[in-house]
C-alpha cells in the first residue's frame, strides 16, 4: 500500500471514529428518558447544541487561521481529545442539567478541528479531480454519525456504554491521525483577509451554493437527530416496550443514517465518470497513484 493510500485510509477511519461524538448523546435520549426525568427542551438541545458549537468553533478557527497556523495532525489530535473528554464528562453531571448542554456545545466547538482538518489533510494528497476523495470523507462523516446507534445496539441499549464507546473511539482516532503523512499539496499559511469571508455572499455562485448547503443541513440534521426517537416509538408500538424493540430500533437507525455513506462514495465516483465522458482526453489520477 502506497503512502498516500495508507494516509487516506487512516484519515477516513479517524473521521468515522471521531464523528461518533456528534450524535453520541442524541442516540441515547430514548434510554435516558427511561432513567432520568429529561425535559423536552434538554432532549432537543442534546443535538442542536453540537451544531451551534460547530458553527462557533468554525468561525473561531477561520478568524484565527488555526487550521493553517497549527500543524494539522496535532490540531486534529487536540480537538479529538478535548471532544472525547467533554463527551465522557456527561457522566459526571446531572444529565437533565444545562451543564450537559454546555459540554455538548464544547464537543461541537472541537468538531471544527476534526472534520475540516481531516479534509485539509486528505486534500494534501489530491491529484486531478477530488470528487471521489470528498465523497469518501463525507461518507465517513455519515457513517461516523450513525455509529453511536450501533454502539447503542451492541451495548444492550445502555446509554453509559454508548457514551464511553464513542469517547474511546475518538481517543483512538486522536492518536491514529499521527500515522498520517501530510501530502505535498500543502500551501503556505495565507495572510488573514477579512474580505475573503464575504466572497461567499458577494459572488452569486458561491452564495447560491452556501444557501443550498445551509438548507440541506437543516433538513439532514433534523432527520438524523430525531429518526432514532421516531423508530424507537414505532418499534415499541409494534413489538411492545422491550429491549428487543429498542435494539432493533437502534440497528434500523444505524442503517438509515449510515446508508448515506454509500451514496456519498457513489456520487464521488459518478462525478469522476461524468467528467471523463465529457472530456475523453481527461484522465483522473488518484492519490493512490502518487509514488
Image: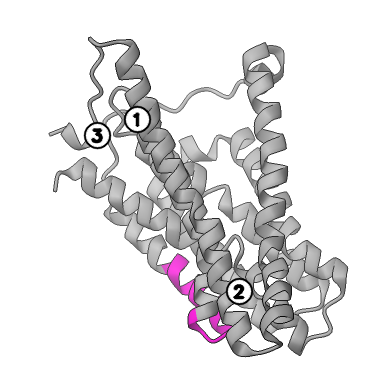
| Residue that appears at 68% across and 57% down | 50
Residue shown at 71% from the left, 72% from the top: 234
Which segment did they paint magenta?
Answer: 154-171
**Local SS, label 1:** loop
Earlier-in-chain disc, 1 versus 3: 1
In the picture of the structure, the residue carrying the numbered disc 2 is 249
* Residue identified by numbered label 3: 287
Residue at x 40% of width, y 42% of height = 265
Q: Label 2 vs label 1: CA separation?
A: 44 Å
Q: Identify the image quadrant of residue 288.
A: top left
Q: For the point 33% across and 33% down, which residue is it?
A: 124
Which of the pair 71/10 is nearer the observer? 10
Colour setting: one colour
Q: Is residue 64 above or below residue 246?
A: above
Q: Earlier in the sequence, mark 2 or mark 3?
A: 2
- In the rendered structure, which disc, 2 or 1, sits on the residue that comes first in sequence? 1
| Disc number placed over residue 227 in the picture, else none | none
Question: Label 1 near label 2: C-beta < 8 Å?
Answer: no
Q: Residues within 10 Å of mark 1 (few under 14, many from 20)?
A: some
Q: Secondary structure at mark 3?
A: helix
Give the numbered dot on residue 186: 1
Q: CA distance from mark 1 to mark 3?
A: 14 Å
Main SS class of the magenta portion in the image: helix
Amino acid at each position: 500500500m502506497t503512502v498516500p493510500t495508507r494516509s487516506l485510509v487512516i484519515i477516513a477511519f479517524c473521521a468515522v471514529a471521531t464523528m461518533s461524538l456528534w450524535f453520541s448523546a442524541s442516540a441515547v435520549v430514548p434510554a435516558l428518558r427511561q432513567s432520568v426525568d429529561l425535559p423536552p427542551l434538554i432532549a432537543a438541545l442534546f443535538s442542536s447544541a453540537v451544531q451551534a458549537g460547530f458553527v462557533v468553533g468554525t468561525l473561531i478557527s477561520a478568524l484565527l487561521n488555526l487550521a493553517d497556523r497549527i500543524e494539522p495532525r496535532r490540531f486534529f489530535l487536540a480537538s479529538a481529545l478535548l471532544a472525547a473528554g467533554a463527551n465522557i464528562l456527561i457522566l459526571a453531571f446531572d444529565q437533565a442539567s444545562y451543564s450537559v448542554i454546555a459540554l455538548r456545545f464544547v464537543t461541537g466547538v472541537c468538531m471544527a478541528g476534526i472534520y475540516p482538518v481531516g479534509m485539509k489533510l486528505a486534500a494534501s494528497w489530491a491529484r486531478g479531480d477530488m470528487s471521489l476523495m470528498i465523497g469518501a470523507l463525507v461518507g465517513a462523516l455519515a457513517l461516523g454519525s450513525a455509529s453511536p446507534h450501533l454502539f447503542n445496539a451492541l451495548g444492550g441499549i445502555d446509554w453509559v456504554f454508548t457514551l464511553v464507546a464513542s469517547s474511546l473511539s475518538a481517543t483512538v482516532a486522536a492518536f491514529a491521525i499521527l500515522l498520517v503523512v501530510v501530502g505535498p499539496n500543502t500551501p503556505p499559511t495565507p495572510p488573514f483577509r477579512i474580505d475573503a469571508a464575504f466572497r461567499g455572499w458577494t459572488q452569486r455562485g458561491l452564495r447560491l451554493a452556501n444557501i443550498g448547503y445551509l438548507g440541506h443541513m437543516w433538513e439532514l440534521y433534523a432527520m438524523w437527530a430525531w429518526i432514532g426517537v421516531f423508530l424507537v416509538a414505532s418499534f415499541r408500538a409494534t413489538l411492545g416496550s422491550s429491549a428487543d424493540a429498542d435494539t432493533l430500533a437502534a440497528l434500523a437507525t444505524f442503517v438509515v443514517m449510515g446508508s448515506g455513506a454509500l451514496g456519498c462514495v457513489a456520487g464521488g465516483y459518478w462525478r469522476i465518470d461524468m467528467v471523463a465522458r465529457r472530456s475523453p482526453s481527461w484522465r483522473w489520477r488518484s492519490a493512490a497513484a502518487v509514488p
